[in-house]
Amino acid sequence: MSTASPMRRWKALATQHLRWSSPVAKGLVLCIITFGFVLPLCCHKLLYSYYYIKSVYLNDMSDKFLAESYERGEEAFGFWKASRSTAMSPEFANIAKGSELLITIVTARRTEGREFHYLLQVMQRLEILLTGCGEGRRCAEVLVCDVESGTMENEDAALLESRFRVVRRTTEEQRGNQAQVNIFEKEKQDYVYCLRKGWELARPKNVVVLEDDALPSADFFTVIRDLLSRRFALHSLYVKLYHPERLQRYWNPEPYRILEWVGLGLVGASALLLVLSYRTAFTSVSATHFLFFTLYIMVAVELAGRHYLLEVRRLSPQLYAVSPATECCTPAMLFPGNSSLRVAEYLDGSFCVKGNAKDMVLYQMARTISGEWAHSLEPNLVSHIGAFSSVRPNPLRPKLL
Ligand SMILES: CC(=O)N[C@H]1[C@@H](OP(=O)(O)OP(=O)(O)OC[C@H]2O[C@@H](n3ccc(=O)[nH]c3=O)[C@H](O)[C@@H]2O)O[C@H](CO)[C@H](O)[C@@H]1O
């Protein structure tokens, strides 16, 4: 029988495990090098990584973002002003009925951030993309829905009238909409108005509604076409085309994300072990090794930033992932079939307030109404360029995070 004290036995065990050649020590060194040196070095400038050094980079990055947006806004303003004097053809002003896709852009006049001309930036991008579907046909019909009903004109929307169809409430409709409501209820009513107006004018097969600060990506129409060809789309109330990047982490738990996370860990660990056993003298693969490498990969991708991993999916429209809808935000929404009408009806039956704006109401709807399903697309199909909100108070100096 051993006479050594428990303390001594524990020390002996610890020394044995922490010998440089032992697997525990090797694992520890690998973790220190990866998480303490390699990842911080590679990721400290990545905005959506845990290693991002906010105190050093955030102010400069935010200012750069604002400066670039301002420049794009100026350019778009010049472009649309010139288009008026050169009498650009009003090609998109006539909306064909029964088309495959209608894009409705909801816009209100901004008091703050007006000089960024968000709407004009979005329309300039659309102008380029709309003609990229080949054979001289346009990719979609377009409707600009100007919900401004104050005494001030929405000048940016007015600038687009020579090229696109711009709708506004008639004086009669405005009179019927004069009841004093909070801004979130007004925003919802405006959205409902635009959904219905789009349907009335175009009777489209599908609808995309963009908020006026949602800048479409280059593959916008290709991905939409691919999405609409997938079977799930037929049964969807809506597909969200944008979710804020800061909420894309695995640690913003959504059940499907946890599955993706574990799956990635398992695949990554298998690949790593395969390479290790092929390239080195690493021969005895045990369950502990497998568990260690699975966790290692999971922690590494989370710390580096899931957002950057999602970007790889842009390689092909088929790689874009669809999952159950997430809660926040509605800058870009696809309403397949005639679901835009159902959504308008559902929204009409609800009342929005601060903390329960139209995005939350929509999310709750899809969860509670039986037979309705809602989805989200990843990665995002638009970038949110609106540093200034038209429904919430704005900070003096907007930041990216
Ligand atoms: C990026 C992001 O997180 N955006 C969300 C945030 O918007 P934001 O706070 O970023 O506001 P925003 O200025 O982008 O406005 C959202 C939309 O509402 C429109 N508008 C504005 C004022 C008005 O009286 N009527 C009107 O229809 C405006 O033209 C735009 O299309 O919160 C909203 C809900 O409150 C939506 O969920 C937005 O998707």
Image (cartoon, rainbow, N blue to C red):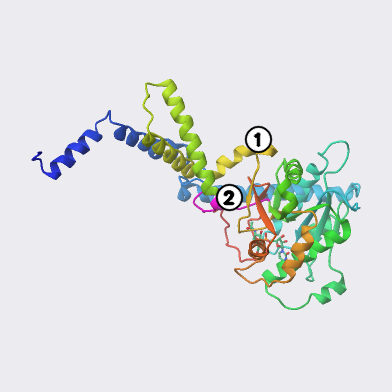
Label number found at residue 315 = 1
> Can residue 139 be seen in this snapshot?
yes
Q: Quadrant of the C terminus?
A: bottom right
Q: In terms of secondary structure, where does tag 1 sit?
A: helix
Relative to 54, 311 lies left or right: right
Residue 246 included in the magenta stretch of the image: yes
Front residue of 273/110: it is 273
Q: Position of residue 399 (x, y in %)?
A: 56, 55
The Cα–Cα distance between marks 2 and 1, rounded to whole angstroms, is: 19 Å
Q: Quadrant of the N terminus?
A: top left
Q: Looking at the image, tell me whether mark 2 or mark 1 is earlier in sequence order.
A: 2
| Location of residue 286 (image quadrant) | top left
Mark 1 is on which residue type?
Leu
The residue range painted magenta reads: 241-256
Q: Position of residue 258 (x, y in %)?
A: 51, 48
Residue at the spot 88% in from the left edge and 36% down from the top edge: 135
Residue 277 included in the magenta stretch of the image: no
Residue at the spot 91% in from the left edge and 51% down from the top edge: 96
Mark 2 is on which residue type?
Glu
The residue labelled by disc 2 is 245
Q: Residues within 10 Å of mark 2 (few under 14, many from 20)?
A: some
Question: Residue extending furthest bottom?
Answer: 179
Residue at the spot 14% in from the left edge and 44% down from the top edge: 7
Label number found at residue 324 = none
Residue at the spot 44% in from the left edge and 43% down from the top edge: 299
- Determine the quadrant in which ligand 1 lies: bottom right
> Can residue 389 be seen in this snapshot?
no
The yes-or-no answer for disc 1 within 8 Å of ligand 1 is no
Question: Residue extending furthest front?
Answer: 1
Q: In terms of secondary structure, where does tag 2 sit?
A: helix
